[in-house]
Amino acid sequence: MRILSLYVFVASVLVSQSGWAQIKKQFSIESASNYEVMEVKFHAQTGVCYFKPTYKKTPLNVYSNLADDEFKHQYTKKVEAGVCQVDLAIKSEEEKGFGKSISMGFLGNTDKEADGLWKVYLSQELKYRLDLKFDISDAFVDLSGINVESLKINSGSANVILDYNSGIGNAAQMEDFKIKVNLGSVEVNKMELTKAKKLNAEIGFGDLVIHYEKIPTQKSEINATVGAGNMVITMPKSGVPVIIKVKDSMFCSANLPKGYRELRSNVYVNKEYSPEKKNLQVINVDLAMGNMIIKEH
């Protein structure tokens, strides 16, 4: 039995290694002296996408396990006024219509990696403006230590997770942060590490989950419209001053922790609130038929 177990273990390792060996570089952009900012528009229809930081100076490397004849792409690159503009759209060889995309979003696709595995590496040596769109692909975005001036995330029926896995935050102030969720979900972990001044979010039927792991050090504002979906925000129980302004309807619900009080009509604050505090978190939410839940940890 021990020999059989060892055989199975070795076989699984070999299969895993052979799978990794199939991953190859598909796109690469070298650094140049005629730009200091890279503007990346990335659109994935299917598959699973990973965005990761790298210490290499190459500002953009894209790897995949797909052969050249297994996917279609549209790619453009130009440099204007010190900004390198890159537009990369990836589609599977099998075209998926709107109806099929919707059904896959509701019913789920348990083997999304079969539609392609994509790994995108961003350098910690450059400034970025990122515009990321995912249709029915899932995405895991790790922006640890990367200088991101602006970030846009658009989820069709995809599940997207934004995190700072190493615990190192954005290398600069994020001036523009936008999230749009249709049927899928977007989860923002360690929100305080984005260093975003303002987050504008639009939620249709999906979910937006925002998690503050530690006490933020700067003032931030969240502006959200929630159609028929859900917005959940979790933050530390103490040390975070919060003011919430709600525009609601009879078809929505807003759940707040104990200790919040109504400052005036549809305006709520917690015990830590003071308008003078430097790390005040301002939440403006327009609820149609959706739900807003505030949690503490």
Image: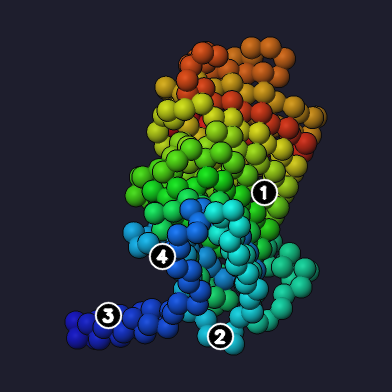
**First in residue order: circle 2 vs circle 1:** 2
Q: Which residue is drawn at 53% across and 68% down?
A: 48
Closer mark to the observer between disc 4 and disc 2? 4
Viewer-nearest of labels 3 and 1? 1
Q: How far apart are marks 1 and 4 (CA)?
A: 29 Å
Q: Which of disc 3 and disc 2 is earlier in sequence?
A: 3
Category of crowding for the residue at label 3, using alpha-carbon neighbours closer than 10 angstroms: few (below 14), some (14–19), many (at least 20): few
Marks 4 and 2, the one that precedes in the sequence? 4
Q: Which of 3 and 234 is in front in this view?
A: 234
Position of residue 261 relative to residue 43, above or below, is above
Q: Mark 3 points at which residue?
A: 9
Q: Residues within 10 Å of mark 2 (few under 14, many from 20)?
A: few
Q: Name the residue under label 1.
A: 180
- What amino acid is labelled 4 in the image? Thr
Numbered mark located on residue 68 in the image: 2
- Identified at 63% across, 76% down, the residue is 73
* Amino acid of disc 3: Phe
Q: Along the line of sight, which residue is nearer the eye, 234 or 175?
A: 175
Q: Can residue 60 be seen in this view?
A: yes
Between tags 2 and 1, which lies in front?
2
Kindly identify which residue carries mark 4: 58
Check disc 3 and report its element: helix, strand or loop: helix
First-in-chain label (4 vs 3): 3
Q: What element carries label 4?
A: loop
SS at mark 2? helix
Q: Position of residue 44 (x, y in %)?
A: 61, 67
- Work out whether residue 8 can be spotted: no
Disc 2 to disc 1, C-alpha distance: 31 Å
* In the foreground, 232 or 81: 81
Q: Give how far across and how far down residue 40 sits, in percent.
A: 57, 59
N-terminal-most mark, 3 or 1? 3
